Amino acid sequence: MDKRKPKKVFVQGAIPPEKIATSVANHQSKTDIGAHSIFLGQIRADEVDGKTVTAIDYTAYEEMAEKVFHEIREATFVKFDITCAHVYHSLGKVNVGELCLFVFTSSAHRRIAIEATNFLVEEIKAKVPVFGKEIFEDETHQWKVNK
Amino acid sequence: MTVTIKYFGLVAEAAEKFEEILELNGALTASELKTQCLNSLNIADKDSVQIAVNQNLDDKITLKDGDEVALLPPFAGG
């Protein structure tokens, strides 16, 4: 049943915006696709007690995270009639305004792709052991918790 | 028996280490080991820390020699 190989999800540092354009271009030869759905997570300059977040430093339990990413991706293929699903997540420091998560699904029709992307994002946030240290401008930090 | 224990995020910060090998005497569940490890650490919300045994979240399991255990603070991906 499990025919898809685990894909490398983690990238060091920010995800370059060019990667999104390249990924779309790579799917233009697949003419059974009628809709792409893309989610991009960007680092927000949150303000906490008068201090502003300047970056998030991501770490992960990498072996478990790669396994959970694969399980979530497999579950997405079972649940939704999609053609493709790609996930990239940053490790290390990502500055405010830069991208830390790129989720990309494709399907024949829009609703399925949109729902599949939403499912992937929610599952990733809930289940993948990734940790984020929010760094403030004065070099102090706090640990991010997903809501 | 010995288990390898890995610390992440705020748990690693409180423990001031990322990994250690622990010698355990007698049968211990993952939950019991978690309580033992967190007792000595200055962590505000200990209930928010989860334990994984050999990369599976399971605090009921009884630990075996050679297990890899991880203490995981709240997830913050994306």
Image (cartoon, coloured by chain):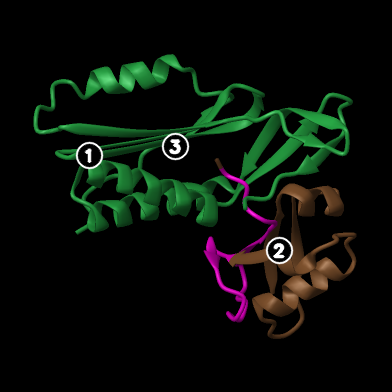
x and y, in percent, of residue A142 in the image: 80, 42
Chain B takes which shade in the image? brown
Query: Is residue A121 found inside the magenta-colored segment of the image?
Result: no
Chain containing mark 3: A
Query: Which tag, 3 or 1, sits closer to the chain's start?
Result: 3
Side of A54 relative to B30 (left or right) = right
Q: Which residue is mark 1?
A: A110
Query: Which chain shows up in green?
Result: A
Q: Nearer the viewer, mark 3 or mark 1?
A: 1
Residue furthest top in the image: A18
Residue A9: mark in rendering: 3
Chain containing mark 2: B
Q: Which residue is mark 2?
A: B49
- Against A4, residue A48 (above or below) is above
Q: Are marks 3 and 1 in contact (CB under 8 Å)?
A: no
The quadrant in which residue B35 appears is: bottom right
Q: Which residues are magenta?
A: B53-77
The quadrant in which residue A68 appears is: bottom left
Give the Cα separation between the discs numbered 1 and 2.
38 Å
| Secondary structure that dominates the magenta span | loop
Query: Is residue B76 found inside the magenta-colored segment of the image?
Result: yes
For badge 3, the amino acid type reads: Val
Give the Cα separation between the discs numbered 2 and 3.
24 Å
Side of A43 relative to A51 (left or right) = left
